[in-house]
Amino acid sequence: MDHAAKDAQSIPAIPAGSSAAAGSHATGRDTDLWTSLLMAAALTSIAVGITWDISWHETIGRDTFWTPAHMAIYLGGVLAGCTSGWLAIKHTFFAGPAERDASVSVFGARAPLGAWVAIWGALAMITSAPFDNWWHNAYGLDVKIISPPHTVLGLGMLGISAGVLLLILARQNRLQDSATPKGSGLFIYAGGVFVLLGTVFLLEYIFPNQQHGGTFYIVCAMMFPMRFVGIGYAARVRWPATKVALVYMAGMCAIDWILEMFPGHPKLAPIFNPVTHMVPLPFPLLLVFPAFAIDLVLLLALKLNSYFWLSLIPLAILSGTVFIAVLLPVQWWFSKFLISPHADNWVFMTDRVWSYSSSRGAWHHQFWDLDSDSLTIQGLFRSWRYAVLSSGIGLFFGHWMRKVRR
């Protein structure tokens, strides 16, 4: 047998309809890089804007709808919507057969799955804008972060976040099938921003002063395991959950440290705390430690991928258990430090996270509601159950996400 015949036999057959054969992906060309970067930029703008907006409310009050923070939020929504809309136009009218096969049809129009989800999220975000403006004109400042218009806004952000993750995920999976596998870095980054957005909407429950209470561990168990397990299972890189947690912590620290550099003064009464600089959000949770524990479980999960449905429940139990087992001691002891005078500095910001409407006092250095919300054995067991359920959901979607190509 000559060398040409041997070479021909060594080339694996690629099904014509497979994503690996889809146009330029078969040659390793990254034709989706710019749209993925634009979607990641949109998600970043939303994350910066929502964090900035909370700081604006705590420092200045709501003086007008046209604040820079609001513009950053809606810029992200518009950018994601326009980019996804262009993808729909491109795949409907200008795509070849291979690109059309890498898209999903909705009422005759075609676009990647992530683009459709992001379009829905952008519409929800844009709808929330006049609703939020009317709400504040009618009722004044929000007493809580999760008001009705903010709920619509949050659902829109969730839609855009999920759409960005799916779009970048499909790019990662197609590139991993190609001759030059790559693409996981952007997926990890989007996952970290996705986690950051989740913590923003838990802000009312995760102050350092609340981290000895049962509610803190319950909401963390509901929110984070599914994100770390799902993204970690789908990512094609080593230690994915740990890297996602590092992106979240680095992003949150960067936004906080930059915010507190700028001057800001209250414009609404009553003023109990005359702040002079923008109020940062509390120091991020040390999620890198439970994320690392989840990564160890994911190493086992990937080895058992061929027996996924048989191993789903044991892996969910193991993931939820290690999450709670690591999060509890880490945050329990770290929160003691955060509410102490030792954390009154620009790095940990304990003395700088209080809004203009918060009176100064010893309660800043105390744990709250320990009489009504103490961490009991029953509460710890509830947290563990939620962590197991959240991990199971993450495993289910992570397994599905590894197959997404369009």
Image: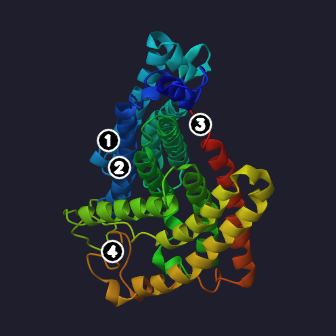
Q: CA distance from mark 2 to mark 4?
A: 26 Å
Q: Earlier in the sequence, mark 1 or mark 2?
A: 2
Residue where numbered disc 4 is placed: 272
Residue where numbered disc 1 is placed: 71
Q: Which mark is residue 404?
A: 3
Between disc 2 and disc 4, the foreground one is 2
Q: CA distance from mark 1 to mark 4?
A: 28 Å
Q: Residues within 10 Å of mark 2 (few under 14, many from 20)?
A: many
Which three-letter amino acid code belongs to the residue tagged 1?
Answer: Met
Position above or below: 127 against 261: above
Position above or below: 72 against 221: above
Q: Residue at x 36, y 73 (%)?
A: 354
Between disc 1 and disc 4, the foreground one is 1
The image shows residue 45 at horizontal and vertical percentages of 34, 45
Q: Are marks 2 and 3 in contact (CB under 8 Å)?
A: no
> Split into 4 quadrants, where in the image is the C terminus?
top right
Q: How is the image coloured?
A: rainbow
Nearest the eye: 352 or 86: 86
Q: Residue at x 51, y 41 (%)?
A: 169
Q: Quadrant of residue 318?
A: bottom right
Q: CA distance from mark 1 to mark 2?
A: 7 Å
Q: Residue at x 21, y 69 (%)?
A: 276
- In the structure shown, which secondary structural element does the residue marked by tag 2 occupy? helix
Nearest the eye: 285 or 376: 285
Q: Earlier in the sequence, mark 2 or mark 4?
A: 2
Q: Give the side of residue 238 with respect to residue 345, left or right.
A: right
The image shows residue 145 at horizontal and vertical percentages of 49, 57
Which three-letter amino acid code belongs to the residue tagged 4?
Answer: Phe
